[in-house]
Image (tube, rainbow, N blue to C red):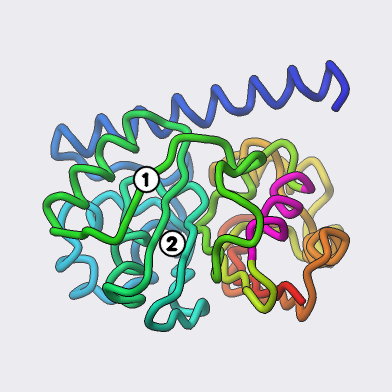
Amino acid sequence: MTTDHADRSAVVRERVRARYATAAGQVRAGQAPSCSEADPTGMCGDAYDPAQLADAGGAGAASLGCGNPLAVAELGAGETVLDLGSGAGLDVLLSARRVGPDGFAYGLDMTDEMLDLAREHAREDGATNVEFLRGHIETIPLPDASVDVVISNCVINLSADKPAVFAEIARVLRPGGRVGVSDLIADDQADDQADAATVAEAAASVGAISGVLRQSAYRAELEEAGLTEVAVTTTREVDAGVFSAIIRASRP
C-alpha cells in the first residue's frame, strides 16, 4: 500500500468511526440514528420483519444497514458466522439464534462505542455463543479457515481498500464456506443514468464515503480473491445510480 493510499485509508476510517460513534451516542440518548445524510427509503431496518426487530430490543432499534444479509445467508445449526462491521450487534444476535448453542457468531467492529453497545445488547439478550472483536475488516483478527459464513450489512462500501476486505473474507472462510452480504453498488449502466460525478455525490449522500464499486467490478474483485459462484443482485435504487444489493459467493 502506498503512503498516499494509507493516508487516505486512515482519513476514511476516522470519518467512519466518528459517524458510528455519533450513532451509538444517539442510541444511548433514546434517539433513532440516521443511516446517512439522505436516509433514503430502503435503508436502515426496514428490510427486517418488525417483530424480529422488536424482539431484538436495543440492537434492533440501532439497525443501520441497507438490507438483511440473514435473508440470503441461509444459516444452519452449528455453523460459525462472522459479521463484518457488526455495529450494535443486531445481525450477530440474530445469527446466534439461528446457529444455536452448537454454533457461534462473531462480530467485528472498529468503533469502541458500538462494541460497548453490542456487548450490552448481548448481555440483555442472554446470548452466550457470541463474541465481539475490535479490529478492521481489511485485517480480520481470526485464523485462516475459521468460519463457515461471512455476512455484512452495508459496511464493505465504507472501506478504502475493498480488495483487502475480499482477500480477508476468502482467507477466513473454510472450504465450502459462503458469503451473504448486503451492500451499496453502482449499476453497470450508471453512466446512462448520471455522470460519474453525480454517482459519486449520490454515493456520499447515502453514506458510502469511500465510493461504491460497479456491479461488474464487485463481482470481479470477489473472483480475484478466489471466491466462486459470485452473484450480485440489485434490490432497489437508493439515489441516482446507486443501488442496494445482495451479494453471494462461495469459497471452493
The disc label shown at residue 41, or none = 2
User: In the rendered view of the protein, which quadrant contains the N terminus?
Assistant: top right
Query: Mark 1 to mark 2: distance in Å?
Result: 29 Å
The main secondary structure of the magenta stretch is: helix
Q: Which of marks 1 and 2 is nearer the N terminus?
A: 2
Q: With respect to residue 79, does 36 lie above or below?
A: above
Residue found 52% across the figure and 79% down from its top: 72
Mark 1 Cα-neighbour bin, 10 Å: few <14, some 14–19, many ≥20: many
Q: Is mark 2 on a helix, strand or loop?
A: loop
Q: To which residue does mark 1 refer?
A: 132
Label pair 1/2, CB-CB below 8 angstroms: no
Q: With respect to residue 61, does 68 lie above or below?
A: below
Mark 2 Cα-neighbour bin, 10 Å: few <14, some 14–19, many ≥20: few
Write down the region rendered in magenta.
163-173
Q: Which amino acid does label 1 sit on?
A: Phe
Could you tell whether 59 is left or right of 224 in the image? left
Residue found 23% across the figure and 73% down from its top: 52
Residue 165 counted in the magenta span: yes
- Residue 124 placement (x, y as % from top left): 11, 52
Q: Quadrant of residue 32?
A: top left
- The count of marks equals 2
The disc label shown at residue 21, or none = none
Could you tell whether 160 is left or right of 3 in the image? left
Q: What element carries label 1?
A: strand
Residue found 55% across the figure and 49% down from its top: 155
